[in-house]
Amino acid sequence: MLPPHRHGSPLESPLMLIDLPGNAVWCGRIAYLDRDGVLNMWKENYVSSPDELEILVGSGKAIATLRRMGFRICVVTNQSPIGRGLWGHDVLYQINDRLQELLLEEDQGAEIDLILYSPYAPSDGAWSRKPNPGMLEAGRQIIDNAHRFPGEHNVLSFGDDWVVRPSESGSILVGDRESDISAAERFGVKGILCDSESGISGVFDKILNSEEG
C-alpha cells in the first residue's frame, strides 16, 4: 500500500490540534493543500533546502482566513526526491519547518494542522502518491481522530479497506497540477486548480464562491 509519511511524527501518533482562531468551531471541513506552487514557489529542480524556500505572497493570509472560517489545514505533497535518492527525510523536515515559520510571519493565524507527504518515486505506484488519494484518506482520519478521540493513536485504513467514510462536501483541495485535481476527484472532495505563479491567493475568490454555493 505504501502509506504516506507525516511531518514530525509517525503516522499513527496522536495529533494535537491547535484551537481555531476567533472562537471558530470546526464542523468537519478540511482544506487539503498541495505545497509547491500553492503555498511556496515551485522550482523545476525541487526545493532542496530551507534556504531555497520562498512562500507565495498571500499564502499565510489565505491559510489564516480559512482557519477563521472553520477549516482545518492539511498539506498533502508529493516529494519524490526522497525516493529518487536526491536527499533524505531530514532535509524535508527542515524545509517544512521553514514553511510554517514563513507562513506565520505573514499571519500569526496561519497554523498548519497536519503535513503529509509521499516520498516515493512515480515508478513505485504508491497509493499515497497523487493522483492516488492515500494522503487525503490519511489526513481525514488523523484529523477526525484528533478531534473525536484526543490523545489516542491512529488506526488507519486505505482504499477499499476504509468502508465508513464521512462526507467531504464542505472540504476543498487546492493544487497546481492535474494530479492534484485527480486525487480530489477520486477522494470525493472539490478540487480547485491554481496557477503556480500565484498559488492559493490567486484562487481565493473561487474558494469563497464555493462556500457560497
Image (cartoon, rainbow, N blue to C red):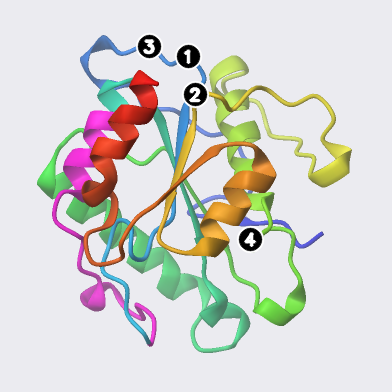
- Residue 61 inside the magenta-drawn segment: yes
Instruction: Find disc 1 in the rendering and name its residue.
Output: 27
| Magenta-drawn segment | 45-66
N-terminal of the pair, mark 3 or mark 4, is 3
Q: Are marks 2 and 1 in contact (CB under 8 Å)?
A: yes
Look at label 3 and name its amino acid: Val
Judge whether residue 173 is colored magenta.
Answer: no
Residue tagged 3: 25
Label 3, label 4: how far apart the Cα atoms are: 31 Å
Q: CA separation, marks 1 and 4?
A: 27 Å
Query: Left or right: where does residue 23 sit relative to residue 213?
Result: left
Residue 142 image-quadrant placement: top right
* Residue 54, horizontal then vertical, whole percent: 20, 68
| Mark pair 2, 1: CA separation | 9 Å
What kind of element bears circle 3?
Answer: loop
Type of amino acid under label 1: Cys
Classify 10 Å Cα crowding around label 3: few (below 14), some (14-19), many (20 and above): some
Q: Report which residue position mark 2 lands on.
A: 170
